[in-house]
Amino acid sequence: FLGLTDAGKELLEVADRILVDAKNMRSIADQFASRDQGRLIIATTHTQARYALPEVIKSFKAKFERVHLVLHQGSPREIAALVAAGEADLAIATEGLDLPDIVSFPCYSWHHAVIVPENHPLAQVETITLEHLAEYPLITYQEGFTGRYQIDNAFRKAGLNPNIIISAIDADVIKTYVDIGLGVGIIASMAYHAGNDRGLRLLDCSHIFERNTTRLGIRRGHYLRDFAYSFIEKFSPKLQEATVRAALTRDN
């Protein structure tokens, strides 16, 4: 839009709406041609794809075998951009879905937790504090991923300067470096599995870090096939089709 006249901007907006309507017409035609066959594109982060979505997708595919499910993984900004551009049907992330072109819905809440080797001194502490964590090198998410801002904000409010020595977008990477003794990890609690993460202890920190909310985003005016609404309801049962349609209609 930079350098365009007001008329030019209006023309681009109209052209964008025409493209969206053209895509919607094709989707509506496909809906009537075959209700249980098609393509569903979901843009999401590694954490959601790895830990929150497997059982949802397993259940969805059992019902819609002929739907081709595409997972685009990226940063919250990349995810939001894909949905805003109409290149993905749904966005699932904890951050980044507050764009004007996207209607987002809260799905579930979660907290960060600390992971340490089983023999680590913190494993013997009854109640972990930020002061405890500030004494050790820390390994956690990159800025902009998986609620990192909540971690930074907690230390900032406490007037502490954490020693974050490694940051990554992948909880499995964080756990790897914790396991070899490089530092104390801070991850999404859902990323820990006692059976798979042997040798590591998960320490509750819900009293330290504020709650995070994972949201689902849809582009305004985007037509969703029936199976997309089924997927949404499997991911978040409170988001039934009537609820989502009403919100999209109200916002439009």
Image (cartoon, helix red, strand yellow):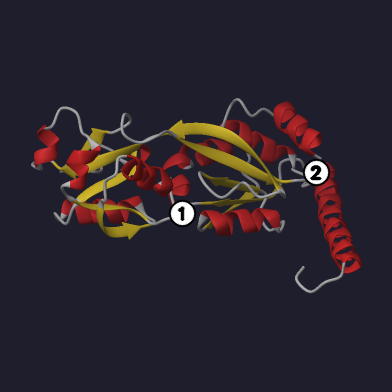
Disc number placed over residue 84 in the picture, else none? none
Q: Residue furthest front?
A: 159
Residue positioned 35% across, 58% down in the render: 168
What is the quadrant of residue 249 in the picture? top right
137 versus 249 height, above or below: below
Q: Element at badge 1?
A: loop
Residue positioned 31% across, 33% down in the render: 208
Give the percent coordinates (x, y) of residue 101.
72, 50
On the question of residue 74 being in view, the answer is yes
Give the percent coordinates (x, y) of residue 42.
60, 50
Seen from the viewer's position, the closer of residues 117 and 146 is 146
Give the percent coordinates (x, y) of residue 242.
74, 27
5 versus 221 height, above or below: below
User: Crowding near pointer 1: few (<14 within 10 Å), some, many (20+)?
Assistant: some
Disc number placed over residue 31 in the picture, else none? 2
Sequence-earlier tag: 1 or 2:
2
Seen from the viewer's position, the closer of residues 231 and 91 is 91
Task: Decide if residue 56 is on the left or right side of residue 185.
Answer: right
Q: CA distance from mark 1 to mark 2?
A: 36 Å
130 versus 246 height, above or below: below
Give the percent coordinates (x, y) of residue 33.
83, 46
Q: Amino acid at mark 2?
A: Gln
Q: Which residue is mark 1?
A: 144
Q: Amino acid at mark 1?
A: Gly
